[in-house]
Amino acid sequence: MSEQESTRQQIEDFLHQMIRPQLQMDGGDLEFVDYLEDSKEVQVRLKGACAGCAGAVMTLQFGIERALKNKFGDKVERVVPA
């Protein structure tokens, strides 16, 4: 497994184990779409109550993105909707 595949899997696992349960408690959900190593971008799809929520941008930037940056440091620059 290459380093990129390993990082991608680690990000996907973190989102599944740590972030999704929090969103699901509020009726939302999250789907991991991709990790682009060159731009350090994580692409996700918000689902359920999160999909049409006015606070979705805040959730992405100040919730999910912050958590990923704290966990993965310089491997994640931003989180964007897919």
Image: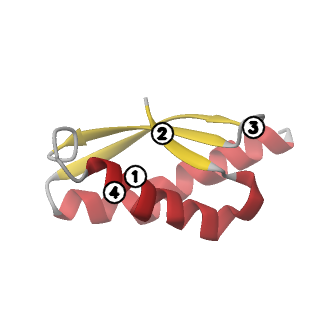
Q: CA distance from mark 4 to mark 1?
A: 4 Å
Q: Given contact means CB atoms under 8 Å apart, are the residues at marks 3 and 2 in contact?
A: no
Say the numbered circle drawn on residue 80: 2
For the residue marked with disc 4, what is the amino acid?
Answer: Thr
**Which residue is tagged 3?**
37
Q: CA distance from mark 3 to mark 1?
A: 19 Å
* SS category of the residue bearing label 3: loop
Q: Given contact means CB atoms under 8 Å apart, are the residues at marks 1 and 2 in contact?
A: yes
Q: Is residue 10 above or below residue 51?
A: below
Image coords of residue 31 (percent x, y): 39, 39
**Quarter of the figure that contains the C terminus:** top left
The residue under the point 14% across, 54% down is 27
**Which residue is tagged 1?**
60
**Quarter of the figure that contains the N terminus:** top right
Q: Given contact means CB atoms under 8 Å apart, are the residues at marks 3 and 1 in contact?
A: no
Say the numbered circle drawn on residue 59: 4
The residue under the point 33% across, 49% down is 57
* SS category of the residue bearing label 4: helix
Image coords of residue 14 (percent x, y): 53, 59
- Precedes in sequence: disc 4 or disc 2: 4
The residue under the point 47% across, 55% down is 15
For the residue marked with disc 2, what is the amino acid?
Answer: Val
Q: Residue 8's image quarter?
A: top right
Q: CA distance from mark 3 to mark 4?
A: 22 Å
Image coords of residue 34 (percent x, y): 57, 33
Q: Nearer the viewer, mark 3 or mark 4?
A: 4
